[in-house]
Amino acid sequence: MFAACADPKAIEGLTWAMCYLTSAKHVDFYWSFVTVLALLAITAPAALAMGFMGATAARSHIAPLRWLGKVYIWMVRGVPDIIFFLFFVIALDQGIEYVKSLAVCPGGEWPWQGLEFRVCADAKVPLGNSPPIWHQLYGFLLAVITFAIVFGAFVANVIYGAMNAVPRAQLETAEAYGMSRAQVFRRILVPQMWIYALPGLGNLWMILIKATPLLFLLGVKDIVYYARELGGSKTQAYEYPHGDWRLWYFLGLMVFYLVFTRVSEIGIGKLTRRLSHGQATAGGEALRKAAA
Amino acid sequence: MKRLLIATALVAVSGTAWAQDVVRLGTEGAYPPYNFINDAGEVAGFEREFGDELCKRAGLTCSWTTNDWDSIIPNLQSGNYDVIVAGMSITPERQEIVDFSQPYLQPTPSAYLALSKDADLMSGPVAAQTSTIQAAFVAENGMQVVEFATPEETVAAVKNGEAVAVLADSDYLKPIADESNGELVLLDKTESIGGGVGMAFRKSDKELHDKLDAAIKSMKCDGTLDAMIQKPEYFGPNSPLAWGDKGKEGC
């Protein structure tokens, strides 16, 4: 990157450290923080939406919808994450390519031949000849979908419980005012259930932050992958040889995760306070007394 | 509107289908000098140079991708890349599920790396990378094996005393021993395992297999393969991996 870094083996001390920390691989490492943050920023709302739909379905009055919601929650919660991430992603990837192959491939052969999955080159997603960025984006997209489905199931269970925790009297009062079922749901149930859901959702957010290393299973290079790769000892085959520095890289990651979770805790605390206003909960009562 | 967007996206994606077909080469990227990710973040090492030269000879456009060693064969089968070029030794077990090219490196000598020359291999577990010929060898020869997902971790296990030694390709271990300031040494005992290193293909990919096989043969015949193997930054001038006269048979 800098002219002084042209011959890394001839420099030492601070210059070496500066060149080392700005090598292209380190820049990739810094970008991977952005990848992780972007994943969280997209996945959290997506999982919330999935969870909301799951919970709504699970308490629906229409039996098939209710079964669908319950089976979704039960199945995804019951399968270990790592199995889900290994199995589901491959199935999703092959499923997408199979559907595409129906549209673009001549012949229409059954693609699962023994251990191999074979579709014509045009059905590959992304196409084999597309630049690496498309492969990365596609991996990222699969990651977002998988995370949203897995965490959505947990969110659904939290929201399902929170909906049941809203005092029945609130809903009955609304019904007595003549509101329809949809109106009760929209105007009374949903605004009030958040305060009951928040502790559970906060927990899930913390777990989601820490679950990002699962990204590497999906072929997305995340911060933990880079920390291990950069920290591993490097022989003279590399431009910047060094010993086993993984401890330092992982310490750095620990600081990152601790700061991030601490900031999240503060944010969740503020949100809890805001949502407690006017609620018939201990927190809401405390706020009312403090104001009086 | 949404449908319009999807249609546009599909056209944009399928539009690139007209470009030339690209062969995707998969490697591990953690096993110098065979293959590793250099400080520029790119695949480097012997197999990088070798693979690029093969593609040039076969008239193919190639791109590189990395994958964990653990899942490198399943991902080949599900089509995430077309060829494995990752220092993979040819074994009967692997041949049942993938097709190998002719070997491009002779059977690799494996060495033990330990804390001292008199380490007793029977006194404790010997580390090896998961799903390697070395891991199988250790288990078959009455030693206790402890497996790790990456080569880096196998060496770390010896350093922190979790294993008495690590068994791996000597070309991977030698620079580590040389640069450890005497902390780590190679035992005199070596093992000859495996049937040479080859590229792995899906069994259904006959055409690609034949093209690259011919390219390997041409590199053996005109001596460029040996010259590449013997480069000091890869395996060195006296490397037993080079072909010599054996590579010229049938040219």
Image: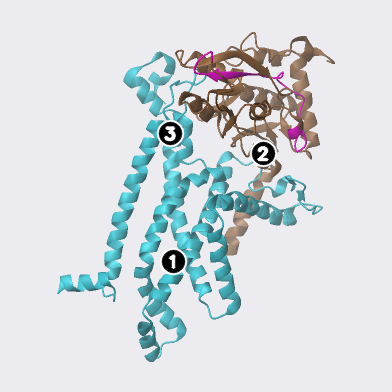
Which residue is depicted at the point 59% across and 28% down?
Answer: B128
- Mark 2 falls within which chain? B
Query: Is residue B138 within the magenta segment?
Result: no
- The amino acid beneath tag 1 is Val
Q: Secondary structure at mark 1?
A: helix
Relative height, residue B20 to residue A201 (above, below): above
**What's the amino acid at mark 3?**
Val
- The location of residue A77, given as percent across then percent down, is 53, 60
The answer for how far apart the CA atoms under marks 3 and 1 are is 39 Å
Looking at the rendering, the stretch of residues picked out in magenta corresponds to B93-118
Chain B is which colour? brown
Do tag 3 and tag 1 residues touch (Cβ < 8 Å)? no
Q: Position of residue A2 (x, y in %)?
A: 39, 24
Q: Secondary structure at mark 3?
A: helix
Tell me the number on the disc at residue B81.
2
Chain displayed in cyan: A
Name the element at disc 2.
Answer: loop
